[in-house]
Amino acid sequence: ATAAARALYENTELPSRKIAEEAMRIAGEICIFTNKNLTVEEL
């Protein structure tokens, strides 16, 4: 998820929340131990 977030941060103009959601979605597709059920808490 970290690599995906870094790539999205460097190459898109998405807001932080969308970067986090997309990075976790990508990780969920790759890793069998990560699911796609997210709860995002924003400060």
Image: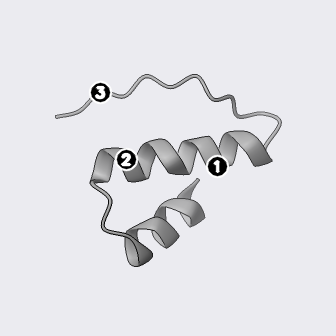
Residue that lies at the very extreme toward the bottom in this rendered image: 10
Estimate the x, y position of residue 16 in percent, counting from the top left.
29, 52
Left or right: 30 as drawn, with respect to 15: right
Q: Does the CB distance between marks 1 and 3 fall below 8 Å? A: no
Alpha-carbon distance for marks 2 and 3? 12 Å
Q: Amino acid at mark 1?
A: Ile
Q: Which residue is mark 2?
A: 18
Which is closer to the viewer, label 2 or label 3?
2
Estimate the x, y position of residue 34 in percent, counting from the top left.
70, 34
Estimate the x, y position of residue 21 in percent, counting from the top left.
46, 42
Q: Amino acid at mark 2?
A: Lys
Mark 2, secondary structure of its residue: helix
Q: Which of these two is toward me, 13 or 37?
A: 13
Position of 1 relative to 39 (above/below): below
Q: Which residue is mark 3?
A: 41
Left or right: 23 as drawn, with respect to 11: right
Q: Amino acid at mark 3?
A: Glu
